Image: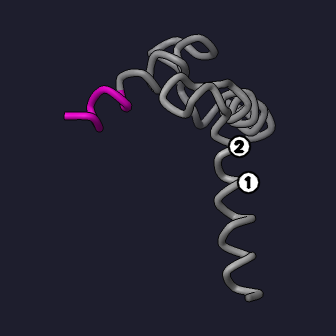
Amino acid sequence: MITRGLNENTNGLLRQYWPKSTNFKEVPLTEVEAVIIQLNDRPRKELSYKTPANKMAEYMAEYMAKEVA
């Protein structure tokens, strides 16, 4: 199942920043936001080496173009 693989991959990426035993109630929101930005700016093979942020920007541009037309 693809969702399990995606979940496991995401967990592995998060473990680069925080160990498994991390209590996220003690992690500042600014730190979490910084990691989110770093992960969304990381190129992904399954996105033809584009970043999730790039893909979302492309999608939103297409969506807005349809809304205006």
Residue 19 numbered tag: none
Q: Are marks 1 and 2 in contact (CB under 8 Å)?
A: yes
Q: Which residues lie in the magenta part?
A: 1-7
Q: Is residue 27 above or below residue 54?
A: above
Residue 57: mark: 1
Query: Badge 2 is on which residue?
Result: 53
- Is the N terminus in the top left, top right, bottom left or bottom right quadrant? top left
Residue 59 painted magenta: no
**What residue sits 74% from the left and 39% below the top?**
33
Which amino acid is tagged 2?
Answer: Ala
Which residue is found at the position 62% from the left and 25% from the top? 49
Quadrant that contains the C terminus: bottom right
Question: Does the segment drawn in magenta span residue 2?
Answer: yes
Count all numbered tags in the image, as a single digit. 2
* Mark 1 crowd level (few <14, some 14–19, many ≥20, 10 Å Cα): few
* For residue 40, above or below residue 64: above
Q: Residue at x 65, y 25 (%)?
A: 43
Circle 1: element type: helix
- Work out how far the residue at label 1 is from the one at label 2, CA to CA, in angstroms: 6 Å
